[in-house]
Image (cartoon, helix red, strand yellow):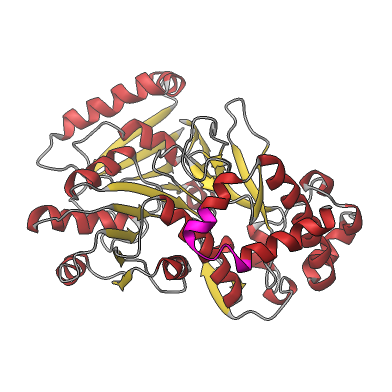
Amino acid sequence: MSTLLEPTFDWLDRNLLRSPAARLWIARHLTPGFISLLQASKFRRLVRYAARHSKFYREAFRQHGIDPKRVRCHADLGNFFTTPEDLKTHPIEDFLCAPGECGFETTGTSMGINKRVYFSYQEMFDYGRDGAAGLYNLGMRRGDVVLDGFDYSFWNAPFTAYYSLMPLRCLHVIGGFIEPQELYDRMKVYRPNVLLGVPTHMVRVTEVAEKNGAWPMKFMLLGGENLSERTRKYLESVWRGARVYLSYGQTENFGITGIECPEKGGYHVSGLSLVSEIIEPDENGYGEMAYSTLNRKVMPLIRYRSADITRWADNGTCTCGLKVMPRLDKVVGRTDELINCSMGNISPYWFEEILRDITAVSGDWQVIVRRGDRDDAIEMNLEPVNGANPQAIREQVLANIQARFPDCWRYYTKGFFALDIKFHPRHSLAGDGRKLRRLIDARRDAWNK
């Protein structure tokens, strides 16, 4: 039966589940047991396929003593993972199992060599059908007008949007990553009721709309970086009727790992295209997400370490059309953003929590860890809004540290680290609207001197 399961489902998928409504209907009626069987079948095929066609996986399996014919699940791979460093240090040809037809690059949140990832047009089309089902679940329909504000430079996000919107056949207005005032002025002609883009950029566009006039909006779908709940509420308050949703993805997976549903309880992950795990979870369930791509022929990835720190969300309370699909909780940081210093093991999540209810500062902030005279010095760079009092902001920051991170407060009162809060003009920290690097460890330069 297992040998017939995958080809039978693939035939149904290609021939009967073409529309977003049909895909959402079948997703609603699948059972966890069926998904697990299908994942297992696809994963076995993936490992054997990669072992035959990929130089990287063939040699890696040999070095780790892995027999592809005996692999049934992630656990059978032992301590083997594919890492972002592998993509940087090995020739891209070592990963390719078939000729690539479209290529993208990603730097993630780390500086250095870009990672390249290749896809076929068929793979992007297939990913787009899953994305369309997620958008349909949020209420998107053919009559909607969608403004896409993603940056098209080497990045996959706009093509993820393109292929996800194609099955829905709504009007797709490609605005691109242009100056916020110009984007606002030009999109007024179309009066979109759905906005897509990166949070930092869409906040800028929303600030323009707040001054010059907003119109009713069905929803906004944002991706590419995290979004604080405070900023989400601000966006929803300006665009009348809007609900702001988040998507989660990586260029390595065509930017379509998961999507929020109307209940905003985490990112639903497609169990039909990914098999995922949380590596070495802590006492709260947080660990690094790793995944294998089940439907890729050009450049499949096996047990790929995402570097994103998250956990599984409680899926029992969700009633949306994707309720059977597992849900990831909000990403709280990346392994390359976790910094061990005198303040503790800090991540961007810490500072999102510290600033969560401080409305006197903007959503743009940056923290730099420096080497002090004896201990670490934590530099918080903030942007006051509406003539806010810097001293009042300092007092509220300290109060939130004391209330929300008591161990950190104890270190501060004992003088284990210095805290320097600096204030900057509005929009100066991320002046061009591009992704702002939230947490920087500047001690390496000091250590090298």
Residue furthest toward the front?
A: 16
Q: Position of residue 333 (x, y in %)?
A: 49, 43
Name the foreground residue: 144 vs 179.
Answer: 144
Residue 436 lies in quadrant: bottom left
Name the foreground residue: 113 vs 40.
Answer: 40
Residue plotted at (63% across, 57% down): 273
Residue plotted at (63% across, 49% down): 271
Answer whether residue 301 is visible to the viewer in this image.
no
Q: Position of residue 343 (x, y in %)?
A: 46, 30
Relative to 350, is 365 on the left or the right?
left
Q: Position of residue 326 (x, y in %)?
A: 58, 41
Q: Position of residue 59 (x, y in %)?
A: 85, 65
Q: Main secondary structure of the magenta part?
A: helix
Relative to 210, is 303 on the left or the right?
right
Answer whether residue 204 is visible to the viewer in this image.
yes
Q: Is residue 158 above or below residue 9?
A: below
Residue plotted at (40% across, 38% down): 263
Name the foreground residue: 124 vs 12.
Answer: 12
Name the foreground residue: 184 vs 423.
Answer: 184
Magenta stretch in the rendered image: 14-24
Q: Is residue 388 rendered magenta in the image?
A: no
Residue plotted at (22% across, 68% down): 179
